[in-house]
Amino acid sequence: MARPARGSVEIVKRKDGLRTFWVRLTVDGRRHRVRLGTDRDGWTPARAQVELEEQVKAVGAGTWAHPDDRLDARQDSDPTFRAFASSWLEDNMLEWRLSTVKDVRWRLKSHLLPHIGEDRLSTFDIPRVTAVKTALLKESRRIAEGIDAGDIERDAHNNPLRPLSNESINKCLALLSRILDDAVERGYLHDNPARRVRRLRHHRPRRPVLESHEVCAMLDAADRLDLRRAGVTEPVAQVAALRAEGQTYQQIADRLQISLSTAHRRQTRYDQAGEPIAYFRIWVRTLCTIGLRIDEACRARRSDVDLIAGCLRVGHAKTAAGVRNVQLTPDTAIDLERYLTMTAERPADWPLLPTRRATFHNRNNVAKRVVAPLVAETNLVLAERGQPGLREGVTAHALRKTYFTFLHGAGAPPRWVADQGGHSDPSTSLRIYTESLRHRERGHHGKAFDALLNPTPASDNSTPGPDG
């Protein structure tokens, strides 16, 4: 006896605000997903429900058939890669995060489909996949040469094209391999040629780890940026800092070579501005002394901070291990308490670090509007102190690596460090710590090396006997 038909209406909200309506049916134990249309096509939840009931009736009458408004890869004996990849994406996208779906669509639309979209699956072999790799390499080199020559290529949205790195090309080949794996399972191919094509060599960028004096300089730089954000200029901040040291207005005027009235006026402006909100300082704390991933920091809410328990709750992460309670250091807890007190009028469900429009940041905004200004100002602070600037490549992830390094350096157990950072395997944070020690231990080894070449007089004595 055949199983009764079952179904439901699925509504997917798109980025452009429209809703796409789907009908999901289970017929004789097989699942079917039928696209109806969008709001623009006149579809509503009520109309979709009526259509579902009609299709369930058709199933019961034995007259139902899957609509064939596009080439269905599951019914075609030798589908094109475009049709099969579209079917594969529809079957898997509901299990993925939105960012993963966006990345897969971009790699398909921009890099794979233009080269092999109309190729039949039966034509895929090692030379064909190798040709795809070569085409992506040539395209990347052409874009790079155009940038060097000042001739920047742009896409349909007038955005400048960037050359693909070897790692990105390998990711495109990995995506192709995943799709062809599914084609093998469904019987369209005997084996997967993409798995036997050699990948390109690439070197993962080594993000620098900040030293303790660099982190202190970044916190001072954050305080400067917070003052500017509150409307306090550098000359005003200079006068306020000297007054905080106990200097008189006459001493300040003489030191800065300004009039006495100017010194008074700048201090008045500082008093009127009030204490600045430690916005940039909390960003440094969140990334460098709490060790959140950039997406976790962007999604953190005020209610996630538990000052009584001394932790910050991470409820949404890219892995199960990422859902955790991160313990706050005493200094970090003090800064967070001060920040939350100064912004106490904000609702508890607000972002912990909102934009000026009270919305959540995204990783691109943070890189451009938070990390880049912090790095630039930190270099100025270090230059004023006669110290070398930060190394190239300081990003939000570099600050997270610094967090792991300091925890290990403080003697924290590896398993606890991994739990704090949201890693399921302690080897990840240990590897970061080991990398940071490579340049830190050189000073110690260098002193020992020089000691061998320049022995002290005491070292020339004969070796002591058993009695010392």
Image (tube, grey):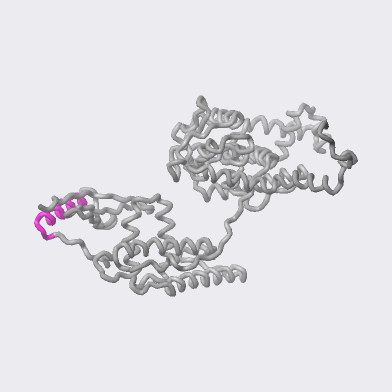
Q: Position of residue 409 (x, y in %)?
A: 64, 38
Of the 4 image quadrants, the one containing the C terminus is top right
How many discs mark residues in the rendered view?
Answer: 0
Would residue 21 appear left or right of 281 to someone viewing this image?
left
Closer to us: 137 or 295? 137
Q: Position of residue 345 (x, y in %)?
A: 49, 29
Would residue 129 appear left or right of 137 to someone viewing this image?
left
Residue located 43% across and 71% down the image: 129
Would residue 323 appear left or right of 465 to someone viewing this image?
left
Residue located 26% across and 70% down the image: 77
Q: Quadrant of residue 399?
A: top right
State whether the magenta stretch is mostly helix, strand or loop: helix
Q: Position of residue 299 (x, y in %)?
A: 47, 41
Residue located 51% across and 24% down the image: 308
Closer to us: 45 or 291? 291
Q: Write the start and end of the magenta stretch as one range.
A: 47-63
Does the stretch in magenta take in 57?
yes
Q: Position of residue 13 (x, y in %)?
A: 33, 50
396 in relation to 255, above or below: below
Closer to us: 404 or 33? 404
34 in relation to 275, above or below: below
Q: Work out whether residue 233 can be spotted.
A: no
Residue farthest toward the front in the current orientation of the protein: 466
Would residue 403 appear left or right of 34 to someone viewing this image?
right
Residue farthest toward the top in the current orientation of the protein: 308
Q: Work out whether residue 173 can be spotted.
A: yes
Does the stretch in magenta take in 262?
no
